[in-house]
Image: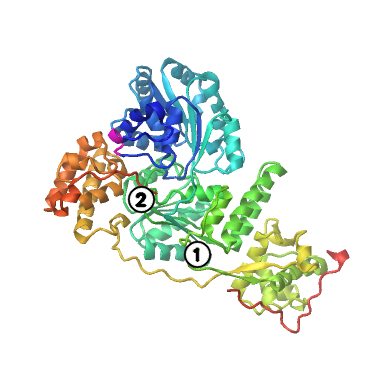
Amino acid sequence: MVDQPGVGANSDAAHDVLRRVFGYDSFRGLQADIVGQVVSGGDALVLMPTGGGKSLCYQIPSLVRPGVGVVISPLIALMQDQVDALNALGVRAGFLNSTQYPDERRTVEAQFVAGELDLLYLAPERLRIDSTLQLLDKGKVAVFAIDEAHCVSQWGHDFRPDYLALSVLHERWPDVPRIALTATATEATRKEIAERLDLTGAEHYVASFDRPNIQYRIEPKNKPDQQLLNFIRTEYPGEAGIVYCLTRNSVERTAEFLSRNGVEAVPYHAGLDARTRATNQARFLREDGLVVVATIAFGMGIDKPDVRFVAHLDLPKSVEGYYQETGRAGRDGLPSTAWMVYGLNDVVQQRKLIDNSEGDAAHRRQLQLHLDAMLALCETVQCRRTQLLAYFGQSGEPCGNCDTCLNPPESWDGTVAAQKVLSAVWRLKHERGQSFGSLHITDILIGKSNPKVLQHNHNELKVFGVGNDLRDTEWRGVIRQLLAQGLLAVHGEYGVLTLTEASREVLRSGRTVMLRREPERVKPAKAPRAKGSRLAAADLSPADADLFERLRAWRASVAKEQGVPAYVVFHDATLREIAARKPADLAQLGAISGIGENKRAKYGEGVLEVVTAGGGGAAENGPASAGRATAAQPAVAPAADHEPPPDWDFEPPPDDGY
């Protein structure tokens, strides 16, 4: 076997573990270099997208180097599933966290000291306890792996104070290699991780952030619950998905709405009792086709590979958060969708949250920068994928698989429209001493003589009715984009609109304002598959697809009996290859990607029974199918300008009045 770059003298050992334990013939991407660095005793800082194979980068060194790999992970609720998945591979793994009884902890501690574990998972807060540090002194540590390393960044979207204490690892055990891993970090965040974890001398490995199997789509918000329901029914009926909402109330309401309309959904947020949260998370991981509706309290480190969509009903606070959350879709490399609805109220709400946030002015400025980048992604007329990659310092070509590529929006000269909005805001403030929100501004512009307008005599303003060339929904889009561009600001509890310094350039200097015109939404074709079927079977023959479904039924039964998620037994991609190749014996089964020695011994006979029960066999595929195939790890024109009405003579406010 040819050595992979970077693995060096330990190449054979690393490759043996990769094939024998995990069932893969070759490393992919940067894995070989990273594994070689850590196995040889060096430190590494790894940025790799979700589904890119980060876990192998510390699991294999833990199995090759003498001692126990210690994994620092904030994912207490998922540690049991992570350990179960490793045990299914024949890896001796355990965890220590606050969910265990004292006897359970003592058993795991004894196994660690005796060298009877290959990997030990720890919550970061346990390293603040002297007894944990003393325990690690008693055993031999092969490697320290710091998962979700972005949690150390105080400017990041998922800061956890306990991560700040992890510099103790290098101070107390300077000879043990460390590997810090994250799927989400800008160059500035990566620098902060390196400094705070004392990894400035480590090798940095930055994989591409691109997830080509994910389609990014952002739509204007209009009855979001119904939009979500239509999206799921049309494109992903019976599939697993995650829906993110900003508040606990919206989580509860959305989960109830989906369930009432035939989409099985459960809520998840920090306000639920611990038992309910644990039950709902366990159901999501173990059941097929369940949707979880959650706040951002849910999802970090979710290992479920067949999440077909991630939906956002509210604007995320940052691009990092958005990327992290959408990355939970399509970990198996199959087509998936990151879908979001976004509207004016999202911008107003996020601005208010920043104004009311704790922290000093510098902290609020940082939050504002995060929001500005998120708004730029929403409002772009360019490829969303290239915009997303550019945020993380990477380049890319238009992908042809996002909404702006598939249905390009137009940009139009919205200077006059912007002047109308800004003039209305200015006149209310300086002629009447009043401030109002976006809905009232829109009513004035389109000339709506409702009670509120008449009560304040706003029908007498010079700007009343000057905007009847656009619909109210279009004016809300104009105001949203002015907020996104910093040409308007929102303040106070009631979200009133105010001018900014940049507004002067539009009102007095004739600055051009280009705006995005939303394209007419093209309703996607109804999904051709029956409810509950899997994309993994999409390109199989009818007979193979039937076998695939029978294999999934067998897997579900085994997983239920063992009390583990189905993917712990086998991933869909593995079952799909079995259905296509129909192995006739254990040797042929061992050539399937993702089936190591332990899984072949544990599940092989059961799989072969399902395959032969359908009357098929390797011979049906001809001689070529009987040979061993290389096992690969699963992948992963401008519109006319709007002219002002002829009876509206725009008058910029006087210099001394602005």
In the displayed structure, 192 sits above or below 248; it is above
Q: Which residue is mark 2?
A: 306
The residue lying toward the viewer, choosing from 97 and 480, is 480
The residue lying toward the viewer, choosing from 222 and 60, is 60
User: Hey, what amino acid is under mark 1?
Assistant: Cys
- Residue 174: x and y, percent? 52, 20
Q: Is residue 119 visible?
A: no
Q: CA distance from mark 1 to mark 2?
A: 25 Å
In the displayed structure, 629 sits above or below 40; it is below
Residue found at x 77% / y 78%: 460
Q: Which residue is mark 1?
A: 405
Q: Residues within 10 Å of mark 2 (few under 14, many from 20)?
A: many
Instruction: From the viewer's perspective, tell me whether residue 11 is left or right of residue 207.
Output: left
Residue found at x 30% / y 35%: 19
Which region of the structure is painted magenta?
Answer: 19-23
The residue lying toward the viewer, choosing from 216 and 291, is 216
Element on which disc 1 rests: helix
Quarter of the C terminus within the rendering: bottom right
In the displayed structure, 253 sits above or below 516; it is above
Q: Residues within 10 Å of mark 1 (few under 14, many from 20)?
A: some
Precedes in sequence: disc 1 or disc 2? 2
